[in-house]
Image: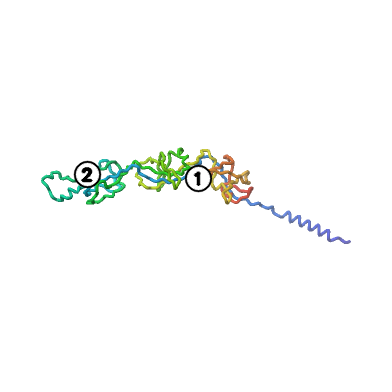
Amino acid sequence: MRFSVIPLLAITCCFMACKNKQNEPDTIQPKSTVSVISAHTGMMAHTEQLSATAHYLRRNTVTAPVAGYVHFVKINFNDHVAKGQLLYTIETKERRALGSFESQDMNDKNYGLINVYAPMNGIITAIPQSQNGVFVSEGSALCDISDNHSLYFQVNIPYEYAKYVKENKSCIITLPDNTSINAQMEMPIMQSLTGLQTIPYMAKPQTDIYIPEGIIATVKLVTYQNSAAIMLPKKAVLSDELMQEFWVMKLINDSTAVKVPVTIGAQNDTMIEIKRPAFNSSDKILNSGNYGLSDTALVKVL
């Protein structure tokens, strides 16, 4: 009795194929490890940092009342002086001409010595005549006194930002050593800086500390603020290479995240305001592991 070999071979091949198919493992789709965060509501403000230069508005130049020679100098540069304090003694030319001659008619030993007193309280900010014996003509400058209570900072505000000054009457001046001083923005100087297209405003600092004239500080001008801004950390917001399109990856279930386009607003060092859509506290947004994910991605939340 003859058996056909071909049907037996066909049955054997089918059996082996089914067995191999059953032994093949299921394809495992990779999952990105991510962390999530929720949007929160808070204050978001945008500020412009402007330069401010220290000036003393009230100053007085002390001049020689007569021509003569500087006999005594009672002050030094940067000294604090009070109104009526003795600054200089000037010896007249007539007294110098007499020399050591003593006349019986000269009963006043102070004859020909003219005292010069401080006309105001302040600080000696310039002292062109500081040596004894120097000849000075009548009306020549002896020293400059600046009123240390007349300190103002000149803030050059761009013309397009002038509309924000009203909301920034109370401002903070930051010195080069990061010291912060409260100040009050006052009336503008009625002359703009043509080349810079800025309006100089005077800011009065509320402090008694001594600040050298010419110090350059900074003032932050608030140009936008929203007390109920929806915010996310910067690293949670992704963008294209041209920074024209922005999106976040939102978790829709335990293991799936989808791309959600967003419209951003102001930002600070760490946070970005989300204008649209309006996320709530229950929405889970990927905060790490989100870079390079496809529009729909499988993820594993830490």
Above or below, 13 against 287 in this view is below
Please provide percent x and percent y for residue 120: 29, 41
Tell me: 74 left or right of 155.
left
Label 2 with label 1: CB-CB less than 8 Å: no
Q: Which mark is residue 70?
A: none
Question: For this rendering, which residue is in front, 114 or 234?
Answer: 114
Question: For this rendering, which residue is in front, 20 or 163?
Answer: 163
Tell me: 31 left or right of 52.
right
* Mark 1 element type: loop
Q: Which mark is residue 268?
A: 1
Amino acid carrying mark 2 in the image: Asn
- Is any part of residue 182 visible from this angle? no
| Labels 2, 1: front one | 2
Q: Earlier in the sequence, mark 2 or mark 1?
A: 2
Tell me: 70 left or right of 36.
left
Please provide percent x and percent y for residue 27: 68, 53
**Residue at coordinates 38% horizontally, 42% vertically from top-left?**
152
- Is any part of residue 144 visible from this angle? yes
- How far apart are the alpha carbons under marks 2 and 1? 60 Å
**Callout 1: few (<14), some (14-19), or many (20+) C-alpha neighbours within 10 Å?**
few
**Callout 2: few (<14), some (14-19), or many (20+) C-alpha neighbours within 10 Å?**
some
Please provide percent x and percent y for residue 281: 57, 40
**Residue at coordinates 49% horizontally, 43% vertically from top-left?**
46
Residue identifier under label 2: 115
Please provide percent x and percent y for residue 32: 61, 50
Looking at this rendering, what residue extends furthest in the right direction?
1
**Residue at coordinates 13% horizontally, 50% vertically from top-left?**
101
Amino acid carrying mark 1 in the image: Asn
Name the colouring of the figure.
rainbow
Question: For this rendering, which residue is in front, 55 or 13?
Answer: 55
* Mark 2 element type: strand
